[in-house]
Image: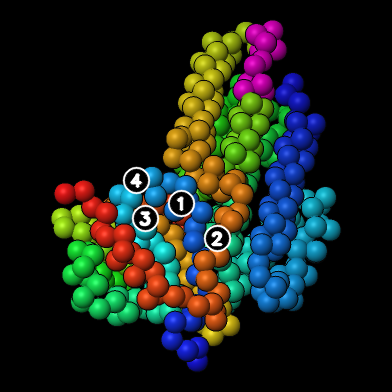
Amino acid sequence: VAPENQSKFYVRIHPAIKREDFSNLPEYLVDYFDLFKALLAEQPHCPEALLDDEFEAESGIKFGSHDLDSRRELAGHRALDMIDLREHYRSVDKIDDRPDVMRVDVYSFARHNAAYDNARNRSLGWR
Amino acid sequence: MLALSPEFESVQSFRASAQNAGSEFLERCFAALSDEASVLWDAEVAPHLDAFESKTAQSLRHNMEWLYLVRDRARAFREKHTEHLTDRDIREVADFADFVDALDLFDQATAGFPSLPTQLTTVKRLRKLRQLAVALAESIPGCLGIVQGSYYAPKVAELYIKVLGMISRWSQVKPYQIAPRDRSKSRVIQRAIADIVKTALCAVDRVVNSAEAKAIRRIQDEAPVEWEMAYQPGDVTNIDAIRSRLRQRGTGKSV
């Protein structure tokens, strides 16, 4: 078992996140992306558990995560939730935790609906 | 007289080339699979693929048998080894299976072509041609619908365009080739065939060139994604350092 503060997973970022998603996000949220990557590398199934209430209070952002509906097209994917005042943001990823793989693929990081649409396009090739 | 043999042979060779395209696809799909899956694929599907390749020059019916076999093997492989395949691989196997199903429907719709007897009178041949055109046109939504948006849609569409073109050419009989008492009847049938062919070509074009279909194909034609590797197991994540950096920067939100 890897010690704390070490990545337990491969974390891969879809190239379109930096190319397309970042330009539609507030600048301060783009800065948080490094944090999300680190959280996913350590604990992708419950990344928000690595953050304390104090950090949430300071940043003003509420963090969470959930599995996506198994009856919908993004079944098997997860979403990292960020609620900043009235705006909801999502980062959609897919975890492969087979021992010989251990990889998290991050497909999108955008406002709620756009994040799901982008993830669907990039993961499933829909348009 | 309606010339049958040379045209029909060209359709058969065209079908064979479409089927070859299918095996090229399987090669690509095979190359895209992970090493472990490749070994399995090698054992389970490749022998049948080799046999298929050696049969492509033979009759369409025989080729279809091999295509069914490869399709069923590919489907079984996908179901058994899903964990080794990427989403893209799985979709490509599904697209190939759809392509074989579409060829099957196309084959059924054109089954009447070899049985178009040359000894029929011109009007009777025209009537038979009209029946074939109707059967072909009716098969378009089902057949092209299966492959709509996939890599194979233009290939199946080309088969339709080719055969519809043949029907159109065969129906263009000069008045002097028809007995005087049949000329008005034949004109009516010729017009009906022209209408059916025109409508069918529009339907083919609509399916293949719809904006949605083009968009899906564009994605499929895109180069593989070049992922950016952010972390590997064992890398130091430095969550605390990132947090304190964010803290120092403040929220950055505009008030």
Q: Secondary structure at mark 3?
A: helix
- Which amino acid, mark 3? Val
- Which amino acid, mark 4? Asn
- Which amino acid, mark 1? Lys
Residue depicted at 66% across the width and 67% down the height? B33
Label 1: chain letter = A
User: How many C-alpha atoms fall within 10 Å of the one at disc 1: few (<14), some, or many (≥20)?
Assistant: few
Label 3: chain letter = A
Q: Secondary structure at mark 1?
A: helix
- Which amino acid, mark 2? Glu
Nearer mark to the viewer, of 3 and 1: 3
Q: Are marks 1 and 2 in contact (CB under 8 Å)?
A: yes
Tell me, yes or no, if residue A70 can be seen here: no
Instruction: Give the distance between the C-alpha atoms of the residues marked 3 and 2, in whole angstroms.
Output: 16 Å
To which residue does mark 2 refer?
B228
User: How many C-alpha atoms fall within 10 Å of the one at disc 4: few (<14), some, or many (≥20)?
Assistant: few
Relative placement, left or right, of B16 versus B136 is: right
Q: Which comes before the other along the chain, label 3 or label 1?
A: 1
Tell me, yes or no, if residue B188 can be seen here: yes
Q: Which range is magenta?
A: B168-178
Instruction: Give the distance between the C-alpha atoms of the residues marked 4 and 3, in whole angstroms.
Output: 10 Å
Instruction: Give the distance between the C-alpha atoms of the residues marked 3 and 1, in whole angstroms.
Output: 9 Å
Relative placement, left or right, of B2 versus B158 is: right
Q: Which comes before the other along the chain, label 1 or label 4?
A: 1
